[in-house]
Structures are given as C-alpha cells and as structure tokens.
Image: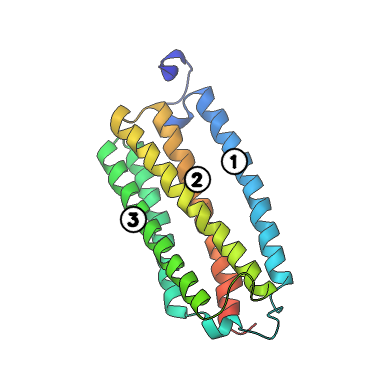
C-alpha cells in the first residue's frame, strides 16, 4: 500500500492524514482548489448584487422569501458542519464506527437541506419567479443553484469515501480523503452563511 512506503519521521501527535508527503501535498492542493471556488462564488455574489434591484417591475424577493423555511435550512446546514467536525474527531481517535455514524448524520442533514431547497425552488417557480422572469431571479437561481449543486456533489463524494472507509478502515489514504471532504463541506457552510445574509436577510428586509 502507498502509505507503507513512507518512513518519515513525524510527531506522534501528527494527524494521520498529514503523516505522508502525499497527504500533505494533496491537502495543500485542495486548499488551492478552494481558492478557485472562492473566486467562483465571489463572481456569482458580485453579479447578484449588481442585479439585486432589477426585478423588471415584477415579483420581488420580499414577496416570496419565508423566514421560517430559510432558518430551518440554515440550521440543517450549520448543524451538519458540527457533526462533520465530530466525524473528524472520531477519525482522529481511530474510531471507524464513530466516523461513519457522524458523517452519515452529516449527509442526512445535507440531504434535508437539499430537499427544502428544491421545495423552495418549486414554490418560487409556481409563483412565477423563474430564470426568465427578471435579471434578479436569474442571478438568484444561478447563485443558490450553484451552491445546491455543490452540496449535491459533496454528498455523493462523501458517500464514496465512506464506502472506502468501511472496506479498508482508517488508513493514511482514507483519512486524507475524509479530511479533504470535510474541508469542502465546511467551505459550503461558510458560503451558505453569505447566501443567508446577503440574499435572504436582505431580501426579507426589502433591500
């Protein structure tokens, strides 16, 4: 196995995913990838704020946004970030069962978020707010839809990693993959905080 070929000196306190050069380089590379993701979402946010008042005299966000649903979605996603952190904690304790359980809970919370987002989109479309309605709604659906797509990809990716953990156990290779996927998940939670604040709260305030 790849990790057996690394006879590097490291502290006993070094997390498993950092104990090989491959692991360290892959994690560094993923941080660089997240930098590109930040650029992507920054562009989407900038476009949204440029078009925030361009509703073409039609439906405004304050007419459709519902605080209760948005708060539930936010709590689901933020709670999933907490459970994801617990999964990493269990991984560091070499507790395979705990890792899988907490990460499975993370995925269930993420799936609940996606279900509510799909329901929200269907409701908006039923009320007449679509990509073609106005520049504002185009920007809204592209921004929130891109985030939702990332969450969907994250769920599928983590499921595949958990299958590997189940089959192989916690090794430097699987630990690296779990850790990198957790960085991705936390990143999506941070992006959602900006969506919640910049899109929904401002929309509910009629800004």
The 10 Å Cα crowd at callout 1, few under 14, some 14 to 19, many 20 or more, is some
Give above or below for 128 relative to 198. Answer: below
- Answer with mark 1 or mark 3, whichever residue precedes in sequence: 1
Secondary structure state at the residue bearing disc 3: helix
Image quarter of residue 98: top left
Q: Position of residue 184 (x, y in %)?
A: 51, 47
How many angstroms separate mark 2 from mark 3 (CA)?
18 Å
Q: In the image, 37: left or right of 162? A: right
| Figure coloring | rainbow
Image quarter of residue 91: top left
Q: Nearer the viewer, mark 1 or mark 3?
A: 3
The 10 Å Cα crowd at callout 3, few under 14, some 14 to 19, many 20 or more, is some
2 and 1 marks in contact (CB < 8 Å): yes
Residue at 45% in and 26% down: 11
Q: Is residue 42 visible in the rendered structure shown here? A: yes
From the image, tell me which residue sits under label 3: 108
- Answer with mark 2 or mark 1, whichever residue precedes in sequence: 1
Identify which residue, 3 or 110, lies in the foreground: 110
How many angstroms separate mark 2 from mark 1 (CA)?
8 Å
Q: Nearer the viewer, mark 2 or mark 3?
A: 3
Give above or below for 156 relative to 65. Answer: above
Q: Position of residue 154 (x, y in %)?
A: 46, 48
- Answer with mark 2 or mark 3, whichever residue precedes in sequence: 3
From the image, tell me which residue sits under label 2: 183
Secondary structure state at the residue bearing disc 1: helix
Residue at 59% in and 66% down: 141
Q: Which mark is residue 31?
A: 1
How many angstroms separate mark 1 from mark 3 (CA)?
26 Å
Image quarter of residue 99: top left
2 and 3 marks in contact (CB < 8 Å): no
Identify which residue, 191 or 113, lies in the foreground: 113
């Amino acid at each position: 196995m790849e990790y057996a070929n690394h006879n590097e000196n490291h502290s006993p306190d070094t997390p498993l995913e950092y104990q090989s050069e491959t692991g360290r380089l892959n994690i560094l590379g993923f941080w660089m990838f997240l930098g590109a993701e930040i650029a992507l979402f920054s562009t989407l946010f900038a476009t949204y704020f440029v078009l925030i008042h361009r509703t073409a005299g039609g439906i405004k966000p304050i007419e459709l946004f519902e605080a209760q649903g948005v708060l539930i979605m936010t709590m689901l996603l933020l709670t999933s970030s907490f459970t994801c952190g617990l999964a990493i904690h269990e991984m560091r304790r070499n507790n395979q069962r705990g890792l899988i359980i907490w990460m499975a809970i993370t995925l269930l919370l993420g799936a609940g978020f996606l279900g509510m987002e799909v329901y929200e989109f269907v409701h908006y479309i039923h009320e007449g707010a679509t990509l073609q309605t106005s520049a504002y709604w185009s920007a809204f659906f592209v921004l929130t839809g891109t985030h939702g797509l990332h969450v969907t990809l994250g769920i599928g990716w983590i499921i595949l990693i958990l299958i590997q953990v189940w089959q192989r156990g916690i090794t430097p290779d699987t630990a690296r993959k779990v850790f990198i996927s957790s960085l991705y998940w936390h990143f999506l939670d941070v992006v959602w905080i900006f969506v919640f604040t910049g899109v929904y709260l401002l929309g509910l305030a009629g800004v």
